[in-house]
Amino acid sequence: MEGDAPAITVQSFETDGKLQLIRNYSDGAFQINDDAIKGSVFLHPRQSKAWPAYTVDDITLNSILDHLGDIRPSILLLGLGEAPKTRLWDLHQALRAQNIGLEVMSTPAACRTWNVLLSEGRDVAAGLLAVSE
C-alpha cells in the first residue's frame, strides 16, 4: 500500500521525566512519575502540584482558574473521587466561556484518561480529588 496514509499514527514523546504521567493512585495519594503527592492534585502536562480540594464543594471556578494561571487548556479533566454524583453544569458553562471543555468523571477514570490524552500530546489539565481506600 505504497503512498497510503497509515491507519494508525502513534505520537512519540521523550521520556525525560518531565511529562506528568500518573503511575499509581491509591490510599489518598498519587504517584506522578517518581514523586508521591499526598491528597488531591492539579496537573498540567509538565507540572503537578498539591490541590487543596477535598470534596466537590471545594471545586470552584476561581480555584480552578488560580491553578491554571495563564494556561488555558482546551480540556480540563475533573476526577471527583469515586462515582461523581454531579456534572457541575454551572462550572461547565463558566469554563466554556473561557474556551475550556470540562470532562467530569471518577478519579480512577480521570487518571487513565489523563495518561492517554497526555501521551497523545493533547492540550489538557486535570484536577483530581484523592481517593481513600
Image (cartoon, rainbow, N blue to C red):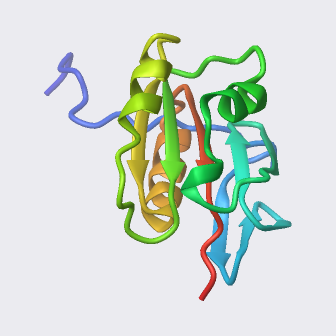
Would you identify the image quadrant in which residue 35 lies? bottom right
**Where is residue 39 shown, x and y percent of the image?**
77, 67
Residue drawn 43% across and 33% down?
Answer: 102
Outermost residue to the bottom: 133
Seen at 46% across and 10% down, the residue is: 97
Q: Quadrant of residue 66?
A: top right
Q: Is residue 23 left or right of residue 111?
A: right
| Count of numbered badges drawn on the protein | 0
Say which quadrant the C terminus sits in: bottom right
Q: Nearer the viewer, residue 112 or 10?
A: 112
Residue that extends furthest to the left in the rendered view of this protein: 1
Q: Is residue 126 above or below residue 29?
A: above
Q: Who's the residue at 58% across and 52% down the image?
A: 57
For this rendering, which residue is in front, 14 or 123? 123
Locate the N terminus by quadrant.
Answer: top left
Q: Position of residue 113 (x, y in %)?
A: 44, 51
**Most foreground residue, 126 or 120:** 126
Quadrant in the picture for residue 70: top right
| Location of residue 4 with respect to 14 vertically, above or below | above
Q: Residue pushed farthest front?
A: 57
- The image shows residue 31, relative to residue 51, as above or below, that is below
Q: Where is residue 73 drawn, in percent x and y? A: 57, 22
